[in-house]
């Protein structure tokens, strides 16, 4: 294949060289093509997420905080709490705190609001809602408690103040028997005057409702002067006349008999004035009764004692008790205490 002049060999070598160069030129693009079109993928980074008080670290290839939360199936709303902006780029070692808002009913006085909040405490919730608390307001739950989903936060507006009041004191009524007035008649002899009392009150109103009152102090500025009412006891028969007309026939004139416990007294007893409630002189024939049981002025007959007139009262004389008047202490002592029958005369 190679002549003496070397021309054929030179041609073959040149042809082989040309063919090799052509082959290399065709193979080179296929080897360099993939390296030129390849895009470098982002490296995974570590991000810490604080959710419901628990912190967990996650690997992620997300670019922003929002994308990272979406990887965790967390949809952000405007009421949620996020410690960093949602569109901020992620960085390795970043710490993100997230709290989802919960529905809460907020009651302020008589106003009702339904809100969503991600506040950690009731106090923070009220600040976010621009609710200013006053010193006496009552907050439920406590301001340092955490709001509960679907719970109620209540603010009761409480107003307290004191007031000074002057109140009248009605005059008491005192009755006095007057023998100069006709029996069964009454007459106001002194109208009396009302007193005055100073009362210091503490008032408490809840949510502008009716104030509850508490008396802090009370004092009398002026005592009342009693009203005096005279009760007529005139036209009573005298004991002598009464005895003359009825002593000999008591049973015919008597009504139903009444069993009573009887005691005895004399006009000059210790502390006695000798004048009865009806204004009569105390003594034999004048007896003391309970006016609620036997009205004053009632004519009576007591076997063994004689005719009597209910003309006086006594502190211990209540109900079926009667105190018989005697002219001498000896007679009173001899009578003592006993059960007797009393006739109320018609």
Image (tube, rainbow, N blue to C red):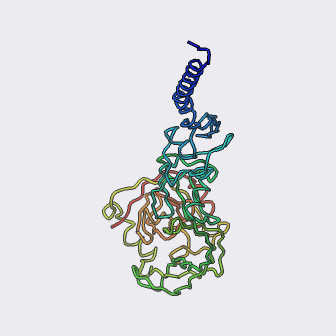
Q: Nearer the viewer, residue 238 or 120?
A: 120
Between 230 and 89, the one nearer to me in the picture? 89
* Quarter of the N terminus within the rendering: top right
Going by the picture, which residue comes out furthest to the left? 252
Left or right: where 121 falls relative to 180: right
User: Residue extending furthest top?
Assistant: 1
> Who's the residue at 54% across and 59% down the image?
155
Along the viewing direction, whichever of 208 and 110 lies nearer the viewer: 110
The answer to which image quadrant residue 250 occupies is bottom left
Quadrant assignment for the C terminus: bottom left
Left or right of 343 in this view: 265: right
Q: Is residue 5 above or below residue 55?
A: above
Q: In terms of image quadrants, where is residue 136?
A: bottom right
Residue 246, how many percent across, how many down?
A: 37, 68
Residue shown at the point (46%, 73%) measured from the top left: 239
- Comparing 189 with 127, the one in front is 127
Q: Whole-percent x and y of residue 105? A: 47, 54
Tell me where residue 297 appears, x and y as whole percent.
Answer: 43, 72
Determine whether 118 is above or below 43 in the image: below
Q: Is residue 218 above or below residue 317?
A: below
Q: Residue at x 45, y 74 (%)?
A: 240
Number of numbered discs on residues: 0
319 sits left or right of 159 in the view: left
Q: Is residue 199 above or below residue 120?
A: below
Residue 279, percent from left and from top: 53, 78
């Amino acid at each position: 294949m190679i002549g003496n002049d070397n021309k054929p060999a030179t041609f073959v070598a040149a042809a082989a060289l040309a063919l090799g160069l052509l082959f290399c030129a065709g193979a080179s693009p296929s080897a360099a093509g993939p390296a030129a079109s390849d895009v470098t993928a982002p490296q995974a980074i570590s991000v810490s997420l604080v959710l419901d008080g628990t912190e967990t670290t996650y690997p992620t290839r997300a670019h922003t905080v929002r994308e990272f939360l979406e990887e965790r199936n967390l949809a952000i709303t405007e009421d949620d709490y996020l410690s960093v902006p949602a569109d901020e780029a992620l960085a390795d070692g970043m710490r993100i705190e997230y709290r989802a808002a919960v529905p809460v009913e907020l009651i302020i006085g008589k106003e009702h609001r339904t809100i969503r909040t991600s506040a950690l405490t009731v106090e923070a919730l009220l600040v976010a809602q621009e609710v200013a608390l006053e010193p006496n307001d009552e907050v439920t739950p406590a301001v340092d408690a955490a709001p509960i989903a679907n719970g109620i936060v209540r603010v009761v507006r409480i107003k307290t103040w004191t007031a000074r009041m002057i109140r009248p004191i009605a005059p008491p009524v005192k009755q006095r028997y007057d023998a100069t007035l006709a029996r069964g008649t009454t007459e106001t002899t002194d109208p009396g005057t009302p007193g005055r009392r100073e009362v210091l009150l503490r008032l408490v109103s809840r949510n502008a409702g009716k104030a509850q009152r508490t008396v802090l102090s009370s004092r009398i500025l002026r005592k009342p002067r009693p009203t005096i009412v005279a009760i007529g006891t005139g036209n009573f028969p005298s004991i002598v006349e009464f005895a003359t007309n009825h002593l000999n026939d008591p049973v015919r004139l008597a009504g139903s008999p009444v069993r009573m416990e009887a005691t005895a007294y004399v006009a000059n007893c210790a502390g006695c004035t000798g004048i009865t409630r009806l204004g009569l002189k105390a003594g034999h024939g004048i007896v003391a009764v309970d006016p609620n049981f036997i009205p004053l002025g009632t004519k009576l007959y007591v076997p063994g004692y004689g005719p009597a007139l209910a003309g006086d009262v006594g502190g211990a004389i209540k109900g079926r008790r009667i105190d018989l008047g005697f002219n001498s202490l000896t007679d009173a002592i001899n009578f003592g205490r006993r059960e007797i029958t009393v006739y109320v005369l018609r």
